[in-house]
Amino acid sequence: MPHVRTYCKAYGLVEKDQQTINKLQSKQSPNCNEPNKPESKFCAKCHMVLTYDAYSETIEEKQQKESEVKELKDKYEQDMKSMKDEMNQQFKHIMAMIQQNSQLAYIKPEALTTKKLNLANDL
Ligand SMILES: [Zn+2]
Protein backbone atom coordinates (compact mmCIF):
# COMPACT_ATOMS: atom_id res chain seq x y z
CA MET A 1 0.00 0.00 0.00
CA PRO A 2 1.50 3.33 -1.05
CA HIS A 3 2.26 5.76 1.68
CA VAL A 4 -0.28 8.51 2.33
CA ARG A 5 2.47 11.09 1.95
CA THR A 6 2.95 10.04 -1.66
CA TYR A 7 -0.66 10.91 -2.43
CA CYS A 8 -0.41 14.13 -0.57
CA LYS A 9 2.71 15.10 -2.44
CA ALA A 10 1.02 14.22 -5.69
CA TYR A 11 -1.80 16.64 -4.90
CA GLY A 12 0.60 19.31 -3.69
CA LEU A 13 -0.74 18.93 -0.18
CA VAL A 14 2.63 18.33 1.48
CA GLU A 15 4.06 21.55 0.09
CA LYS A 16 0.98 23.40 1.18
CA ASP A 17 1.24 21.77 4.61
CA GLN A 18 4.89 22.78 4.84
CA GLN A 19 3.93 26.36 4.03
CA THR A 20 1.32 26.25 6.76
CA ILE A 21 3.92 24.94 9.21
CA ASN A 22 6.32 27.69 8.17
CA LYS A 23 3.61 30.24 8.67
CA LEU A 24 2.73 28.79 12.06
CA GLN A 25 6.37 28.68 13.09
CA SER A 26 7.06 32.24 12.03
CA LYS A 27 6.54 34.74 14.78
CA GLN A 28 4.13 37.33 13.60
CA SER A 29 4.61 40.66 15.29
CA PRO A 30 1.52 41.47 17.36
CA ASN A 31 2.29 45.11 16.74
CA CYS A 32 2.88 45.41 12.98
CA ASN A 33 2.02 41.86 11.74
CA GLU A 34 5.52 41.44 10.27
CA PRO A 35 6.29 37.67 9.97
CA ASN A 36 9.57 37.11 11.79
CA LYS A 37 11.89 34.08 11.92
CA PRO A 38 10.84 31.51 14.56
CA GLU A 39 14.04 32.17 16.52
CA SER A 40 13.53 35.93 16.51
CA LYS A 41 13.31 37.52 19.91
CA PHE A 42 12.32 40.88 18.59
CA CYS A 43 10.36 42.02 15.53
CA ALA A 44 12.73 43.04 12.74
CA LYS A 45 10.42 45.85 11.74
CA CYS A 46 9.15 47.46 14.94
CA HIS A 47 11.41 45.79 17.60
CA MET A 48 8.39 44.50 19.46
CA VAL A 49 9.22 41.71 21.93
CA LEU A 50 8.19 38.35 20.41
CA THR A 51 9.22 35.72 22.97
CA TYR A 52 8.68 35.30 26.67
CA ASP A 53 12.47 35.05 27.14
CA ALA A 54 13.03 38.37 25.41
CA TYR A 55 10.11 39.78 27.35
CA SER A 56 11.53 38.71 30.71
CA GLU A 57 15.01 39.86 29.63
CA THR A 58 13.55 43.26 28.82
CA ILE A 59 11.73 43.34 32.15
CA GLU A 60 14.93 42.37 33.98
CA GLU A 61 16.85 45.08 32.13
CA LYS A 62 14.15 47.57 33.02
CA GLN A 63 14.20 46.47 36.66
CA GLN A 64 17.99 46.66 36.62
CA LYS A 65 17.85 50.21 35.31
CA GLU A 66 15.15 51.13 37.79
CA SER A 67 17.15 49.77 40.70
CA GLU A 68 20.19 51.70 39.45
CA VAL A 69 18.11 54.86 39.29
CA LYS A 70 16.76 54.15 42.76
CA GLU A 71 20.30 53.61 44.02
CA LEU A 72 21.40 56.95 42.56
CA LYS A 73 18.33 58.64 43.98
CA ASP A 74 18.94 57.12 47.42
CA LYS A 75 22.59 58.17 47.25
CA TYR A 76 21.59 61.69 46.21
CA GLU A 77 19.07 61.90 49.03
CA GLN A 78 21.67 60.57 51.46
CA ASP A 79 24.19 63.13 50.19
CA MET A 80 21.64 65.92 50.49
CA LYS A 81 20.73 64.76 53.98
CA SER A 82 24.33 64.64 55.16
CA MET A 83 24.97 68.01 53.51
CA LYS A 84 21.94 69.44 55.29
CA ASP A 85 23.07 67.87 58.57
CA GLU A 86 26.51 69.36 58.06
CA MET A 87 25.05 72.79 57.32
CA ASN A 88 22.77 72.56 60.35
CA GLN A 89 25.72 71.62 62.50
CA GLN A 90 27.78 74.49 61.10
CA PHE A 91 24.86 76.86 61.65
CA LYS A 92 24.47 75.67 65.25
CA HIS A 93 28.19 76.12 65.70
CA ILE A 94 28.05 79.67 64.32
CA MET A 95 25.02 80.49 66.48
CA ALA A 96 26.86 79.18 69.55
CA MET A 97 29.88 81.33 68.64
CA ILE A 98 27.64 84.40 68.20
CA GLN A 99 26.05 83.73 71.59
CA GLN A 100 29.52 83.66 73.11
CA ASN A 101 30.67 86.74 71.25
CA SER A 102 27.95 89.06 69.94
CA GLN A 103 30.46 90.89 67.75
CA LEU A 104 30.53 87.82 65.47
CA ALA A 105 26.96 88.57 64.42
CA TYR A 106 28.34 91.45 62.33
CA ILE A 107 30.66 89.13 60.45
CA LYS A 108 29.41 87.41 57.33
CA PRO A 109 28.50 83.78 58.13
CA GLU A 110 30.77 82.69 55.27
CA ALA A 111 33.70 84.04 57.27
CA LEU A 112 32.83 81.70 60.13
CA THR A 113 33.73 78.45 58.41
CA THR A 114 35.60 75.80 60.33
CA LYS A 115 38.86 76.91 58.73
CA LYS A 116 38.56 80.42 60.13
CA LEU A 117 37.37 79.19 63.50
CA ASN A 118 40.67 79.99 65.23
CA LEU A 119 40.68 83.46 63.76
CA ALA A 120 37.08 84.03 64.93
CA ASN A 121 37.94 82.87 68.44
CA ASP A 122 40.69 85.49 68.59
CA LEU A 123 38.20 88.32 68.15
ZN1 LIG B 1 6.56 44.35 14.42
Image (cartoon, rainbow, N blue to C red):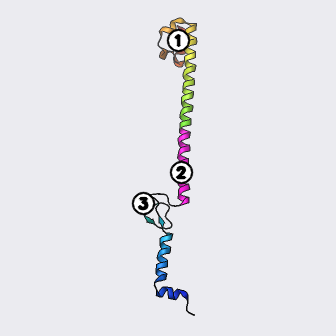
Regarding mark 3 in the picture, which secondary structure is present there? loop
- Please provide percent x and percent y for residue 82: 57, 28
- Which residue corresponds to mark 2? 61
Q: Residues within 10 Å of mark 3 (few under 14, many from 20)?
A: few
Task: Identify residue for label 3.
Answer: 32
Q: Position of residue 41 (x, y in %)?
A: 50, 61
Residue 55 lies within the magenta run? yes
Tell me where residue 45 sits by quadrant.
bottom left
* Dominant secondary-structure state across the stretch colored magenta: helix
Type of amino acid under label 1:
Ala
What is the C-alpha distance between the residues marked 1 and 3? 73 Å
Query: Height in image: 34 above or below 86?
Result: below
Q: Residues within 10 Å of mark 2 (few under 14, many from 20)?
A: few
User: What is the x, y in percent for residue 30?
Assistant: 47, 60
Q: Earlier in the sequence, mark 2 or mark 3?
A: 3
Magenta segment boundaries in residue numbering: 47-72
- Tell me which label, 2 or 1, sits earlier in the chain: 2
Image spot of residue 72 (x, y percent)? 53, 38
Q: Amino acid type of disc 3?
A: Cys
On the image, numbered disc 1 is attached to which residue? 120
Q: Is the residue marked 3 within 8 Å of ligand 1, measured from its CB?
A: yes
Q: Nearer the viewer, mark 1 or mark 3?
A: 3
The amino acid on which the numbered mark 2 sits, given as a three-letter code, is Glu
108 up-or-down from 17: above or below:
above
Q: Residue at x 50, y 9 (%)?
A: 105
Q: CA distance from mark 2 to mark 3?
A: 24 Å
Labels 1 & 3 near each other (Cβ < 8 A): no
Q: Mark 2 near mark 1, Cβ–Cβ under 8 Å?
A: no
